[in-house]
Image (tube, helix red, strand yellow):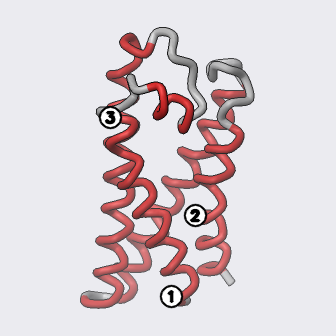
Amino acid sequence: MDLLAQLCTAVTAVILIAVFPFEAFLIDRPWVQRFLCIEPHGIANVHLWSFCIGARNALAGIGALVGLWILHYGDESTGVTVVVTVLIYMLLSSLAMGVADLLGFWRPRGGSVRGTVASSVLPAFSLLVIAV
């Protein structure tokens, strides 16, 4: 597996793990709401979902790091398989955020563009490098 794909995977993993506390525990803070481009209205009603999304993102990040560890210290093909599986999950879940915005579920509409692009570029690039 190419070093550039490994680096992009690791950076994506660290970002997802780092954002977890914002989504899971700090979602009611105005600065977090601005960072995540979400409206403050009704946060108490969606805290359950934001916690779950944050936990899933953190688990995906951990999964990517475990895959990289397996790649280096275990079986190479198993490590690549784990990394590719996690990258596909990261990419598809990111694109689902964009679809939710297109369907009008994001408030304000269009607010997910920055997050969708930011969270899909590195996984897509890693997958492209791995495929080539």
Give, as a three-letter code, the residue at label 3.
Answer: Ala
Residues marked 2 and 3 touching at CB (< 8 Å): no
Asked which quadrant contains residue 23, the reply is: top left
Residue under pointer 2: 123
Q: Position of residue 121 (x, y in %)?
A: 66, 60
Q: Earlier in the sequence, mark 2 or mark 3?
A: 3
- Residue on which the image places disc 1: 1
Q: In the image, is 75 to the left or to the right of 128?
A: left
**Image coordinates for residue 31, horizontal then vertical, percent:** 48, 32
Q: Earlier in the sequence, mark 1 or mark 2?
A: 1
Closest to the camera, between mark 2 and mark 3, is 3
Q: Secondary structure at mark 3?
A: helix
Label 2: how many residues lie within 10 Å, few (<14), some (14-19) or many (20+)?
Answer: many
Q: For residue 42, which numbered disc appears in the image?
A: none
Q: Residues within 10 Å of mark 1 (few under 14, many from 20)?
A: some
- The label shown at residue 24 is 3
